[in-house]
Amino acid sequence: MGSYPTNAFGLYDMHGNLWEWCNDWYGTYGGTVTDPVGAGAGSYRVMRGGYWNGFARSCRSANRFYAHPSYFTYDVGFRPVRSAP
C-alpha cells in the first residue's frame, strides 16, 4: 500500500512531495476553528503541504501558502479526492 506508515489521519504518503492546490480562496479565517472554510472569493488560491526541496518544517498538511490561479512551477500540483461513501 504506502511506502511509509499511516499518519494520524490514517492516510499514506501525503506530505512533502509538492505544494497542492486547494479549492479555497485565500483569506483570513478569524478565530480558532478546527476545520475552517476558506474565503468566499478572492484573487489567490490556497496551496498546502510544502514540497520536496523545501524546509522540513514546511512539509506538513497544515502548512498554507497562496498564489494566483495562473501560477505554475515544478513544485506545485494537485491531489484528486472524492468523498467517502
Image (spheres, rainbow, N blue to C red):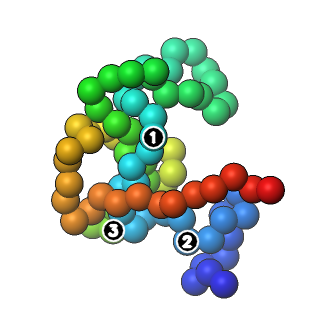
- Residue placed under numbered mark 3 in the picture: 52
Q: Which residue is mark 2?
A: 13
In the picture, residue 35 is in which quadrant? Answer: top right
Residue found at the far top of this picture: 30
Q: In this orientation, does residue 26 appear?
A: yes
Pick out the residue farthest to the right.
85
What label sits on residue 77 in the rendered view? Answer: none
The residue tagged with tag 1: helix, strand or loop?
Answer: strand
Where is residue 4 drawn, in percent x and y? Answer: 60, 79
User: As shown in the figure, which amino acid type bears the numbered disc 2?
Assistant: Asp
Q: Residues within 10 Å of mark 3 (few under 14, many from 20)?
A: some
2 or 1: mark nearer the eye: 1
Q: Position of residue 36 (x, y in %)?
A: 59, 28
- Mark 3 vs mark 1, CA separation in Å: 22 Å
At label 3, the amino acid type is: Trp
Q: Which amino acid, mark 1? A: Asn
39 vs 56, nearest the viewer: 39
For the point 33% across and 68% down, the residue is 52
Residue 10 in percent (x, y) is at: 72, 64
Q: Which residue is mark 1?
A: 23
**Nearest to the observer: residue 4 or residue 68:** 68
Taking the spot 39% from the left edge, 22% from the top edge, the residue there is 41
Q: Say above or below: 69 vs 34.
A: below
Q: Quadrant of the N terminus?
A: bottom right
Q: Is residue 12 left or right of residue 22?
A: right
Q: Residue 78: x and y, percent? A: 41, 58
Whether residue 56 is visible here, answered yes or no, is no
The kind of secondary structure element at disc 3 is loop
